[in-house]
Image (spheres, rainbow, N blue to C red):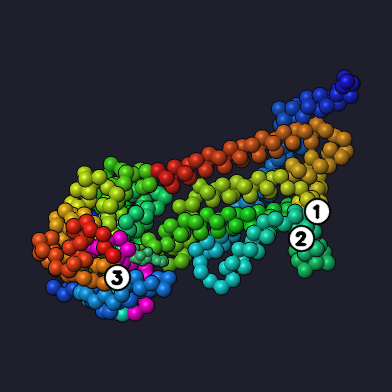
Amino acid sequence: MVNKDAMEPFTTAFANAWHLIWTADADLMGVLALSFQVTGLAVLVSCLIGFPLGAILGVGRFAGRSASLVAINALMGLPPVVVGLGLYLLLSRAGPLGVFGLLYTPTAMVIAQTVLVTPIVAALTAQVTEEMHREYRDLFATMGMGQVQQAATLLWDGRFALTTAALAGTGRAFAEVGAVMIVGGNIDHVTRVMTTTIALETSRGELALALGLGLILLVLSLAINAGVMGLRNMGMRLAHG
Amino acid sequence: MADPLPFRPPAAAPVMPDRPAVRIEDLRLTRRWRKVIDGISADLGTPGCTAIMGPNGAGKSLLLRTIAGLEKPQGGTITFAWPPTPEKRRVALVFQRPVLLRRTALANLVHALRQFGVPRAARTDQAMALLERADLAHAAKTPARALSGGEQQRLALVRALGQAPDLLLLDEPSASLDPRATAALERLIRQAIHDGVRVLLITHDRGQARRLANRVVFLHAGRVTEDTPSDRFFDVAQSPQARAYLNGDLLL
Ligand SMILES: Nc1ncnc2c1ncn2[C@@H]1O[C@H](COP(=O)(O)OP(=O)(O)O)[C@@H](O)[C@H]1O
Ligand SMILES: [Mg+2]
């Protein structure tokens, strides 16, 4: 038997959450905007590093290549809180990068998410380009293409798969709590993103904002997954006609 | 605007009068401890088209791949009729299964022309001219891998021609094509021959060899067993291996 009164806080919370979304509540919008800025920038930087890095690993034949691939795959599984802790030590006043005063700033959060997302993008890029390179290798050789040209060609031909990689990274960055909590500090109106706000508001018993953000996060992750599926289909069509 | 004609007019061809494009001496290639090319010496790339025939596994593909620089031989020499450091790549290879990029037909050609050093401003026009040559202008915006087998092979062929090669290596280009697609491909090959490109054509299709080639080199177990003008080859093949091949007998 469910006590009707016990359910009431939840129904009210849902109603309030919906109201916050519907009226574009300023706090909620602020948190949302920062989330998009931090994650967008982090994914952008991750792609700028991860695409070329992954393509070089996928195409290149050089000493240390396998070791790099192993390292990147290991970095993919880094626990976010450990990344947060490591960055905290680097960025704190006493740390080697303390002079920049980045701790508890959105920049620190961008750095944290970049550290988490870059290995994902690089590893997926290496996988995609290596597979295509096996197929294209002889053609490239007959055309006398250099390694940089080859990497660029593979990046373009893998564009759908690579966008998928970027989306996977975006999903991880949006959903991550531990690292941004530690280096951002979850400061109201300064470093609060969706996940850290949900964690805080829930622990305070303020369910409306938490639920509202939770709903948005859910819709975002569904949209990202739908995008991944759609891109995969488009990539298949280009690959197989 | 640059000259939209992608093909080197015959007059501008480098002087290589009747010299063979490539001289092969005692070529040896070992794969998994097997001598898959076992001492081949031949002057190849004589004017016109040379058919390379022989049973499966004779070493035909590996011979072309070695000439194209894709395989490193264990012994022997390959000497081209042109200086060893060419400013452009003079040898083009078309694979048995065409390798096309995941882009439109047009973009495939533009990409290739870029690798061949064609200035940006001229690439699209040249690519369109190549598409027209392949009778593929209507498919310019079609993803290359969505084209039919015959169209894909024609695209791969004009991509190779966009390189303006002196020596064109074709590895069973029509092996998986129907007669009509084969005829369309042969028209392209014939035109290239007419334009002065030297062609080495691997084929199992005797009719095709008769139609296109003026010379047949027959390979068996990594060796050349016969090297004759094509009309003579099909009338009276001299080597027992070639006779058996033409009769459809099993070779051991
Ligand atoms: N990478 C390889 N490793 C081992 N054997 C190979 C390799 N490539 C080709 N071969 C062998 O070399 C022989 C000649 O191959 P190929 O030139 O492809 O024959 P074909 O005349 O049918 O084109 C075949 O017996 C083939 O099995
Ligand atoms: Mg073969």
Residue that appears at 77% across and 33% down: A211
Q: How many marks?
A: 3
**Residue B78 appears anywhere in the view:** no
Query: What residue is shown at x 66% (from left), y 45% (from top)?
Result: A171
Locate residue A238: give its quadrant. Answer: top left
Q: Quadrant of ligand 1?
A: bottom left
Residue B70 falls within the magenta-colored stretch: yes
Seen in the picture, residue A237 relative to B225 is either above or below; the reply is: above
What is the crowding at mark 2: few (fewer than 14 residues within 10 Å), some, or many (at least 20)?
Answer: many
Circle 2 residue: A87
Which contiguous range is marked in magenta? B52-75
Mark 3–mark 1 CB contact (< 8 Å)? no
Secondary element type, mark 1: helix
Observer-nearest residue: B27 or B95? B27
Judge from the rendering whether residue B107 lies leftward or rightward of residue A35; answer left or right. left
Marks 3/2: CA distance?
62 Å
In this view, the mark in front (3 or 1): 3
Give the residue number, with chain letter if any, for mark 1. A182
In percent of width and height, residue B244 lies at 20, 61
Q: Position of residue B246 (x, y in %)?
A: 19, 59
Residue type of the residue flagged with mark 2 = Leu
**Marks 2, 1 in one chain:** yes
Asked whether mark 3 lies closer than 8 Å to ligand 1, one says yes
Q: What residue is disc 3 on?
A: B222
Number of other residues with Cα within 10 Å of mark 1, as a class: few under 14, some 14 to 19, many 20 or more: many
- Circles 2, 1 touching at the beta carbon (< 8 Å): yes
**Co-location on one chain, circles 3 and 1:** no
Residue drawn at point x = 64 percent, y = 36 percent: A222
The residue positioned 54% from the left and 51% from the top of the image is: A162
Q: Chain of mark 3?
A: B
- Amino acid under label 3? Gly
